[in-house]
Image (cartoon, grey):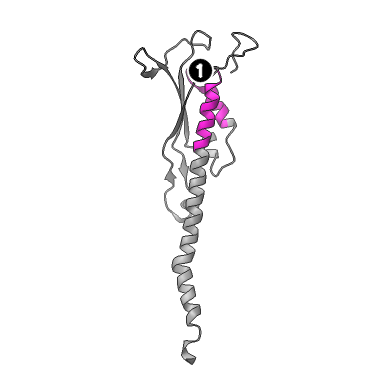
Amino acid sequence: MAGRKGQSTVEFILAFGAILLPMTFMLIFVSQLLWVWHSVNEFTREGASYASSHCWESSGQNVVDFMRANVPPMVMGDQVQSGPAQISVAYFSQDDTGQLAPYSGGGDCSTSCVPDVVTVSISGFQFGSFLTSVGLPPITVPNLQASLPMESAGFNADTPGACVP
């Protein structure tokens, strides 16, 4: 029995190094990935909500500017502001058959030309965390999009015809 001193210590070190430590890092990594995914998804919904209640611009630049100025506190949020992540805004109208088609209304926001639906999407967002520091490529989050019907279309109820940009 004298030669078996320290056996449990060696077994613990082997189990910790081979199982517990990698599982701990995996749990942290997956939790952070899901947090970022949820944050980007919720951010996309917030952009669609903003777009549905503000005047439409054919380029959607007012929505993109709003989203870039209001990125929630999240890991790698700077990708949306100036990085590889792209924000797209598309407006649609319903045709006579009820199908959605790209909106091709007039150039300016007015009460006579309002799209029916807006879709905001974020593509190219990459989650790297500590992966890039160990030489692995970042994980690209799938394209996320949110569609909402146009609400007030940005028209001020107090001042008829006045548009909120």
**Label 1 SS:** loop
Residue furthest left as drawn? 97
Residue furthest bottom as drawn? 2
Nearer-the-camera pick, 61 or 133: 61
Give the image location of residue 90, x and y in percent: 44, 23
Which residue is rendered at x = 56% and y = 26% of the image? 65
Residue furthest right as drawn? 158
Q: Is residue 81 magenta?
A: no
Q: Is residue 69 left or right of residue 148?
A: right
Give the image location of residue 139, x and y in percent: 43, 46
Depicted 41 relative to depicted 12: above or below: above
Which residue is rendered at x = 49% and y = 80% of the image? 8
Name the quadrant of the C terminus: top right
Residue of label 1: 57
Where is residue 163, by image quadrant? top right
For the magenta stretch, what is the residue range?
Answer: 41-68
Name the magenta segment's main secondary structure: helix
Depicted 1 relative to depicted 53: above or below: below
Which residue is rendered at x = 34% and y = 14% of the image? 97
